[in-house]
Amino acid sequence: MIKLGVNIDHVATLRQARKTFEPDPITAASLAVLGGADIITVHLREDRRHIQDRDVRLLRETVCTKLNLEMSTAPEIVDIALKTKPEQITLVPEKRQEITTEGGLDIVTQKKTIMHVVKRFQDAGILVSLFIDAEEDQIEAARDVGAQFIELHTGNYANAKDVTDRNTMIEKLQNGVKIANKLGVRANAGHGLTYQNVGLLVESLDIEELHIGHSIVSRAVFTGIQKAVSEMKELIYRHSLQKPQIIN
Ligand code: PXP
């Protein structure tokens, strides 16, 4: 079954609104794992708007499933990540003014920098995923720089304005997974996914991991995070069963 990565950045966003000690993302991570999270993801942004260095340190000590650190290629963050030794890092583009990650990483124009960063993590035994749009040249570039995974950006699917638009986005993502499979790059997906739109994606894409944050943390405000995560897991499971099975 597709693994669920739960991004808990927005628990820290709420804490940082008052720069206090609660709610603590470390507690959120433990409860998310109890609810069935296969992966815990945090994004240590250069401006530290939500996740703090202390969170990353404590999560490394306490997350026993898989810790995925989202990050830019800024040297300071790369050094922290190498010291932290998460199981996986995901390189994302990062702009100061953005509310959230706005689009995929442009590997094609930054191949040399990204290749250098990827190699440092590979040498340290840390898996590397690159968050990109489902474009052929970007997927080829991900293969060229030596990443094991890509995470396909699902934001445009999530924001589709009608059914036609949504189906076009699904086809684009399916094509992205096909290209990745052909090139020997493992495919994940995420961004903008909700309890309403995750089902079709699960039924349509052969991917390994789904990365979801805002929608789960939003539901958690009302239900608690353990329940919010288990409801998302249940949805993924149910829709996996509806996937057309290929018999060889
Ligand atoms: N994947 C990546 C690479 C992201 O940057 C984010 C947002 O931090 C997510 C997934 C989760 O997106 P959302 O919060 O919209 O579910």
Image: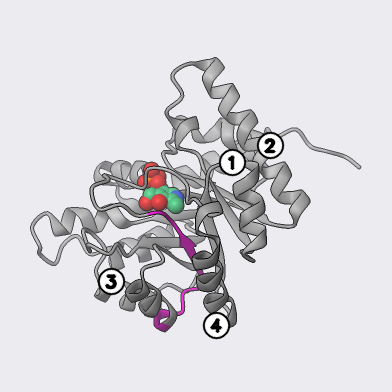
**What amino acid is at disc 4?**
Ala
**What amino acid is at disc 1?**
Ala
Residue tagged 3: 55
Of the numbered discs in the image, which one, if any, rests on residue 124?
4
Q: Nearer the viewer, residue 221 or 21?
A: 21
**Are circles 2 and 4 on residues that touch, CB within 8 Å?**
no
The answer to whether residue 106 is left or right of residue 141 is left
Q: Which residues are magenta?
A: 83-93
**What amino acid is at disc 3?**
Asp
- For the point 43% across and 43% down, the residue is 103
> Which element carries disc 4, helix, strand or loop?
loop
**Are circles 2 and 1 on residues that touch, CB within 8 Å?**
yes
Give the total of numbered labels.
Answer: 4
In space, the residues marked 2 and 4 are separated at their CA atoms by: 32 Å
Residue 129 found in image quarter: bottom right
Q: Residues within 10 Å of mark 3 (few under 14, many from 20)?
A: some
Residue 203 in the image, given as x and y percentages of width and height? 64, 34
Residue 71 in the image, given as x and y percentages of width and height? 39, 63
The answer to whether residue 138 is left or right of residue 33 is right
Residue tagged 1: 134
In space, the residues marked 3 and 1 are separated at their CA atoms by: 31 Å
> Which element carries disc 2, helix, strand or loop?
helix
Q: Nearer the viewer, residue 152 or 203?
A: 152
In space, the residues marked 3 and 2 are separated at their CA atoms by: 37 Å
Q: In the rendered structure, which disc, 2 or 4, sits on the residue that comes first in sequence? A: 4
Judge whether residue 184 is colored magenta: no
